[in-house]
Image (spheres, grey):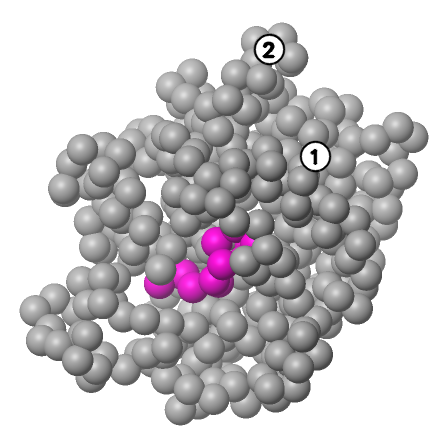
């Protein structure tokens, strides 16, 4: 979605989706997705991101880009419920194809779009496929309190999280995108499966589209559910800068909870490291320890915007920019050195996108 960067601004969520984004997506080709994925992977690597989860169309093109540039990817082929089930069947075929070629760099999850756009039968089928192949699930759920209210009104009073439980999805392990509409009634269901689920919060888009409240971190903490931090797509968040996303997460949680001590520095950094690893179901990521995967970023903190350093964690969270990343290593392979991407020509990628 980096191809749509800046193309849908200053509008509410419904206008953003219906009038601007979906008409563009209807015209996407495999070549478009490959070009966008290469640009996205370059931007992420140069910003210190070593692994990402994506939920989109043409996943084999995204896998091609990730392998070419040397970044880890967890890809979830997206589908909506539609008459005849053609969309679901095509997405399931993509899942099976990607599963046969999965490796340490590129893995696959099952990707129904959202609880509100995928019916119970298709969610059950998703859980069955995930169980058959030993995969996790990635989808949008409880994206807003309004969405939660709509699902309750149309699904027998059940919240989106309860729908996920009833259809067997939570048991399989789920990366829940956004979760801003998670409510107190969801606490028991979340706690029961906290060892295999995570919620990814992407605050920049919520600020732009006035999503209120944002991801309810106290409820997640009470349930023991890991929090991960995402940039969302560049159509809503403009950048794939996770440093920015982490900073906004901390600031918006302080404001939402009216507590300056909410979302402290180390908690926020843990969310982009260990929380991200939990969201991918890959505990070997997100840490520098014996037996871990050997992914790391070296960050230059010598710039004037980082000095003086009283607390290195605070410097990383509140001062560092993506452009301060100097070297990036993925699985022991250096892919960025001296702020230069070694695996592809960034100028050529940009020219192709244009």
Query: Residue 222 placed where, x, y %?
Result: 31, 29
Residues under labels 1 and 2: Cα distance? 24 Å
Q: Dot 2: within a 10 Å radius of its alpha carbon, few (fewer than 14), some, or many (20 or more) residues?
A: few
The residue depicted at 32 percent of the width and 78 percent of the height is: 324
Whether residue 226 is visible, yes or no, is: no
How many discs mark residues in the rendered view? 2
Q: Which residue is mark 2?
A: 153
Q: Residue furthest front?
A: 10
Query: Residue 143 placed where, x, y %?
Result: 51, 33
State which tag comes first along the sequence, 1 or 2. 1
Q: Dot 1: within a 10 Å radius of its alpha carbon, few (fewer than 14), some, or many (20 or more) residues?
A: many
Query: Residue 306 placed where, x, y %?
Result: 18, 74
The residue depicted at 61 percent of the width and 72 percent of the height is: 39
- Picture quarter containing residue 301? bottom left
* 284 and 345: which is toward the camera: 345
Q: Which residue is mark 1?
A: 127
* 286 and 141: which is toward the camera: 141
**Range of magenta residues:** 233-243
Which corner quadrant holds the C terminus? bottom right
Which element carries disc 2, helix, strand or loop? helix
- Picture quarter containing residue 71? bottom right
Any magenta on residue 61? no
Indicate which disc residue 297 carries: none
Tag in front: 1 or 2: 2
Which corner quadrant holds the N terminus? bottom right
Establish if 318 lies above or below 56. Answer: below
The residue depicted at 29 percent of the width and 43 percent of the height is: 252
Any magenta on residue 236? yes
Left or right: residue 104 versus residue 284 is right
Whether residue 236 is visible, yes or no, is: yes
Establish if 9 lies above or below 74. Answer: above
Which element carries disc 1, helix, strand or loop? helix
């Amino acid at each position: 979605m980096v191809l749509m960067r800046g193309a849908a601004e200053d509008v509410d969520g419904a206008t953003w989706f219906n009038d601007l984004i979906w008409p563009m997506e209807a015209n996407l080709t495999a070549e478009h997705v490959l070009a966008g994925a290469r640009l996205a992977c370059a931007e992420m690597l140069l910003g210190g991101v070593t692994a990402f989860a994506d939920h989109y169309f043409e996943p084999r093109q995204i896998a091609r880009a990730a392998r070419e540039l040397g970044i880890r990817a967890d890809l979830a082929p997206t589908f909506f419920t539609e008459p005849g089930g053609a969309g679901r069947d095509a997405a399931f075929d993509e899942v099976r194809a990607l599963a046969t070629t999965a490796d340490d760099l590129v893995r696959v999850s099952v990707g129904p779009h959202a609880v509100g756009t995928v019916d119970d039968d298709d969610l059950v089928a998703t859980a069955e496929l995930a169980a058959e192949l030993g995969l996790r699930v990635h989808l949008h759920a409880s994206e807003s309190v309004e969405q939660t209210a709509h699902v309750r009104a149309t699904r027998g009073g059940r919240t989106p999280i309860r729908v996920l439980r009833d259809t067997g999805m939570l048991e399989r392990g789920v990366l829940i995108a956004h979760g801003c509409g998670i409510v107190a009634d969801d606490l028991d269901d979340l706690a029961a499966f906290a060892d295999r689920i995570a919620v990814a919060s992407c605050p920049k888009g919520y600020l732009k589209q006035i999503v209120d409240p944002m991801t309810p971190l106290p409820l997640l903490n009470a349930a023991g559910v890991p929090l991960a931090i995402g940039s969302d797509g560049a159509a809503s968040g403009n950048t794939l800068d996770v440093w920015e996303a982490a900073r906004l997460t901390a600031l918006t949680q302080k404001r939402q909870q009216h507590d300056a001590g909410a979302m402290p520095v180390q908690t926020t950094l843990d969310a982009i490291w260990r929380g991200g690893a939990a969201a991918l179901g890959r505990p070997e990521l997100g840490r520098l320890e014996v037996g871990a995967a050997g992914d790391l970023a070296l960050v230059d903190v010598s710039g004037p915007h980082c000095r003086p350093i009283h607390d290195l964690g605070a410097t990383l969270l509140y001062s560092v920019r993506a452009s301060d990343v100097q070297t990036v290593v993925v699985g022991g392979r250096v892919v960025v050195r001296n702020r230069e991407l070694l695996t592809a020509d960034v100028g050529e990628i940009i020219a192709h996108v244009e």
